[in-house]
Amino acid sequence: MTIARYANRFVCDLVAYEAGKPIDETARELGIDPSQIIKVASNENPLGASPLAKSAMRAALDEVHIYPDGGGYRLRGAIAESLALGRENVVLGNGSNEIIELLCHTFLNRESELIAAQHAFVVYKLMATLFGASYIEVPDPHFTHDLDAMADAITENTRLVFIANPNNPTGTMVDQVTIDRFMNRLPDHVIAVFDEAYIEFPESAPDTLRYVRDGRNVCVLRTFSKVHGLAGLRVGYGLAPAPIAELLQKARQPFNVNAIAQAGALAALTDVQHVANTRRINREGMDFYQLAFTTRGLEFVPSHANFLLVKTGSGDRVFRDMLTHGVIVRAMSSYQLPDWIRISIGTPAQNIRCLNVLDAVLATPVT
Ligand SMILES: *Cc1c(COP(=O)(O)O)cnc(C)c1O
């Protein structure tokens, strides 16, 4: 195969993103029914989608022959209103992953640098690589972003600093004082990106939107994939001062968020009951696992999100063995954490089953 010789070098060098293993694929491989399998690997909402979103999406089917509103007028307006921002501050994306890509499109080239933490979400690195930029990884002692060290790492070539808060896959969070100190040091040629995909899960969280209102160099990422249960729909958004938002709008496809997704997301925003139920079941599941791991003497990282990192020894082995019992978790070797797995909080029944299977697998000697 020589065609790759003619392709963009940055694309050739890319290691594709490895997603959580799909239920259907697992069912095919094990030769069992998909309904026998639980997936607690991708931090999805175990309660499913917001019921209000589902009914709005069914209604939207009747208009699906019409192109969506490329400007996302209603959804951007509703998001802005719920956060006391303006519509001009909101950029919709095909998942917040698209906003990550738009930021890289807009601000990175072969001379520039993107800074992230050692155990940050891998998509930042993939995107930096895709645009030919340098990816600068800053150590995160105790699995927590070290914002002082990240500020120290900024050079004249730095354009983006990614801070996931709470972070995936560690579940740790940085506080307001630390963020304020970081923002005080941020030079004019750098944008701080706060990826807040899990911001609805902690009891309380720092406020980064004040920096959007103050017109600072920030972009805050949010998503409908987690607390709203709409991961399959692909809707997320960026919140930024208008001059930054306008640039991102230029970099996107004209109809990047489809009509069903806009209708579903709009309804999900109003579904405070579903969000409350999701937060409650998550808190209960988190307590269940943390107590169970403590009892068993298994090391874990206390989490503010809807998943937990737990140290099991060979995560690849534990992942594979749990899979044969129909439970899909995430091995963490691609995050330089070969002895850890990440478990998403499920329903109470899923949590019990997952823990029982983990116990069985850990009790079985490695062959
Ligand atoms: C899940 C997740 C997202 C959300 O991605 P979408 O594209 O909105 O589904 C973003 N950032 C992090 C760190 C995540 O874990």
Image: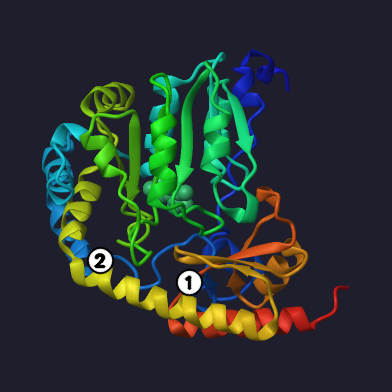
Against 45, is 189 above or below? above
Q: Is mark 1 within 8 Å of ligand 1?
A: no
Q: Residues within 10 Å of mark 1 (few under 14, many from 20)?
A: many
Please identify the quarter of the rendering in which residue 202 is found. bottom left
Q: Which mark is residue 57?
A: none
Whether residue 90 is visible: no
Q: Earlier in the sequence, mark 1 or mark 2?
A: 2
Q: Is mark 2 within 8 Å of ligand 1?
A: no
Which of these two is toward me, 335 or 70?
Answer: 335
- Please, what secondary structure does the residue beneath circle 1 have? loop
Indicate the amino acid at tag 1.
Answer: Ile
Q: Quadrant of the N terminus?
A: top right
Please identify the quarter of the rendering in which residue 70 is found. top left
Left or right of 316? Residue 117 is left
Left or right of 349? Residue 330 is right
Tell me where residue 327 appears, x and y as whole percent.
59, 73
Identify the residue position indicated by label 1 in the image. 345
Against 79, is 107 above or below? above
Q: Residues within 10 Å of mark 2 (few under 14, many from 20)?
A: many
Indicate the amino acid at tag 2.
Answer: Ser
Identify the residue position indicated by label 2 in the image. 50
